[in-house]
Image: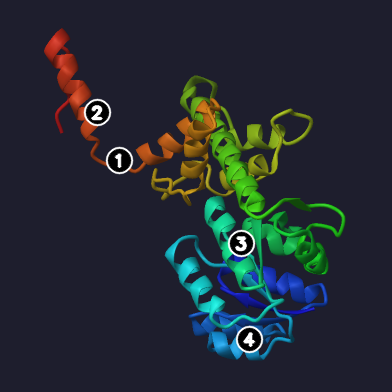
Amino acid sequence: MKLGMIGLGRMGGNMAQRLMQGGHEVVGLDAQLAPRQLLEQQGGESAESLTALLQKLPTPRVLWLMLPAGDITQAMIDALLLLLEPGDILVDGGNSYYQDSVRRAQQFADYQLDYVDCGTSGGIWGLAEGFCLMIGGEQAAVKRLTPVFQALAPSPERGWAHVGPAGAGHFTKMIHNGIEYGMMQAYAEGFAMLNKKTEFDLDLHQIADLWRDGSVVRSWLLDLTTTALEQNPTLAGIAPYVSDSGEGRWAAAEAIALDVSAPVITLALLERLRSRESDSYSDKLLAAMRKGFGGHDITHR
């Protein structure tokens, strides 16, 4: 199959390369020249504009969108709606909000177009290991795209699934990322306690590696933790600042909307927000209150 890839950043570029390794042809579009040149060096084609990209694809066309969620994705979708023709398929493989995907799918249907939302996990390792694909959309469109999903997944039979109608793919990925937040936070807190117990002189890399075999807490995240501790045991040069892509916020809000208790996911998100406070007003106020009611000392900088 020949398809267009819009967005050749790290994830999109790796997906394009894996597709080509699986026998598919890829025409890539990116605002930057370097990713387009890299795609050509790997055996793909590139286009300098959306119009040029569409002209290079057979009809009905398949386009895969790998752009950041929000305004940039919406702007690209608005542009595509003016250029696509009935029967064309757009796959949004980014981290779009699932309710936006439900709305976009209906809008595409009004134009006799197919919109497939594909929650994508695998990060920078997806090229070598394969991507986990959580797919939402109409059955006919997903069936047509099956060879593409099989090429991207770890194997043709595993690592990808049509999980439901439009929006279901990105909803599933949102919950996936919320769980990821909680798992990462638990590992971080546990290793922080191990690190604090200085009288035992624990080797954190050794313990992380130990837990990779036979332990109920073994996981790919633990594999990555082991590698990080081997390369940088003291985490020197790493700032205690943790960003978020937005999906943890959506998951916490969804839990409230559904009346589902999700304290681990929510607190993991709040810990990420707290990591960004270099001069915490709330902590200063807590210290002032303790001074007021109990005469406790205030530490001055």
Q: Which mark is residue 277?
A: 1
Q: Dot 4 lies on which element?
A: helix
Residue at the extreme top of the image, as rendered: 294
Q: Which residue is mark 2?
A: 283
Density class for disc 3 (Cα within 10 Å; few <14, some 14-19, many ≥20) is: many
Instruction: Tell me residue 69's x, y (percent).
Output: 49, 60
Q: Which residue is mark 3?
A: 105
Lower sequence index among marks 1 and 3: 3
Density class for disc 4 (Cα within 10 Å; few <14, some 14-19, many ≥20) is: many
The kind of residue tagged 4 is Leu
Q: Which residue is mark 4?
A: 54
The residues bearing labels 1 and 3 have C-alpha atoms spaced at a distance of 39 Å
The kind of residue tagged 3 is Ala
Q: Dot 1 lies on which element?
A: loop
Q: Are marks 2 and 4 in contact (CB under 8 Å)?
A: no
Density class for disc 1 (Cα within 10 Å; few <14, some 14-19, many ≥20) is: few
The residues bearing labels 2 and 4 have C-alpha atoms spaced at a distance of 55 Å
Left or right, 221 with respect to 67, comes to right
